[in-house]
Amino acid sequence: MIELRCPIHEDYVQPLEDYFCELTRSPWMLFHEGPGKPHFVMGYFDDKDEADKAWFILRKAFKKLPEAYEATTLAEKDWKEAYKEHLKPWQQGRLHWVPAWMRQTYSVPSDAAVIWFDAGLAFGTGDHPTTRLCAIRLMDYLSQHPAEKVSVVDAGCGSGILALSAAKLGCSSVAGFDRDPESVRVSIANREDNGILADKVHFYHAGLEEGFKLTGPAEVVLANIISDILCIYADDLIHAVKPGGVLALSGILAPEQTKVKEHFEAKCTTIWGGVKSDGRIMGEWSDVALFRP
């Protein structure tokens, strides 16, 4: 396997993120070690020829990317170990997200709601701040409402980790949908790996316009999707929230939070007749929560 790696200017982060989100089973990822450190675009390919072709196509779309990139050949064993190095357990309250290969070594508290994951690069593993922000919003809501009376919809479910977490936390009705059929397949596989019955969490192959017609409205609507798409489908998202519920939006770069918040506040006021809102920031990313009266 070939690991392709190239430093990029921070101005390219959001355009590349948007571009990769449009790809099915994208081989690309963005990597940033932290404040003051460089950003990188990285890709994983079977051989150098495949990497060269992919880089050529990416440079056609983003002409200011450098011609050269750093290539590292990874042995199968090295790749598997490198992949595991990037994924660590995460915990918030009762909720624990743990790599599947740690089943025999991870100490599970007696009252824990555990999701075991091994979703690969193309889907959510819970390692990204945007996924965690959504999970925290879900848990905030459950701290004020009995889980057995709460319905949840995960719009753009990816690996299904948020929907499966809602089920593990005891929510009464849980559904997720994604326009990528492979994401739905992975979500279903993760549901099975975590011993969750199909009638507890329903997954659908659908986009934002069709998805809510299949799931119906919910008290908690989670949408971890890029800002532009969130704003385009604002009406669909807002109409999907039941009275007294919350719409939790993530996938928003911190500098874009105010713009997204103001866009949704105006629409929520029109559609709901009023709204309370707030936003949080985690590193370079943020969320917006809109509370329906």
Image (cartoon, helix red, strand yellow):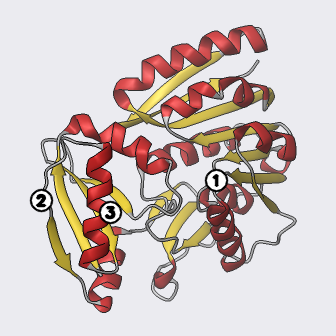
Question: Whole-percent x and y of residue 126?
Answer: 49, 59
Q: Looking at the picture, which amino acid does disc 2 mark? A: Ala
The quarter of the image holding the C terminus is top right
The earlier-in-sequence mark between 2 and 3 is: 3
Position of residue 53 relative to residue 18, above or below, is: below
Residue 5 in the image, given as x and y percentages of width and height: 20, 63
Q: Which quarter of the figure has residue 253?
A: top left
Residue on which disc 2 sits? 68
Q: Secondary structure at mark 3?
A: helix
User: Of the numbered discs in the image, which one, if any, rests on residue 54?
Assistant: 3
Estimate how packed mark 1 is, as few (under 14), some (14 to 19) or many (20 or more) residues with alpha carbons within 10 Å: many
Question: Between 105 and 192, which is closer to the camera in this rendering?
Answer: 192
In 3D space, how far apart are the residues under numbered discs 2 and 1 (Cα atoms)? 35 Å
Residue 157's disc number: 1
Q: Residue at x 66, y 66 (%)?
A: 187
Q: Secondary structure at mark 2?
A: loop
Q: Secondary structure at mark 1?
A: loop
Q: Position of residue 118 (x, y in %)?
A: 51, 75
* In the displayed structure image, the side of residue 38 where residue 59 appears, left or right: right
Q: Is residue 90 above or below residue 243?
A: below
Q: If the image is split into quadrants, where does the N terminus sit?
A: bottom left
On the question of residue 62 being in view, the answer is yes
Disc 2 crowd, CA 10 A, few/some/many (<14, 14-19, 20+):
few
Viewer-closest of 60 and 293: 60
Pointers 1 and 3 in contact (C-beta within 8 Å): no
Image point 60% across, 68% down: which residue?
A: 115
Separation (CA) of disc 1 from disc 3: 26 Å
Count the labels in the image: 3
Q: Mark 2 or 1, which is nearer the eye?
A: 2
Mark 1 is on which residue type? Answer: Cys
Q: Quadrant of residue 277?
A: top right
The amino acid type found where label 3 is placed reads Ala
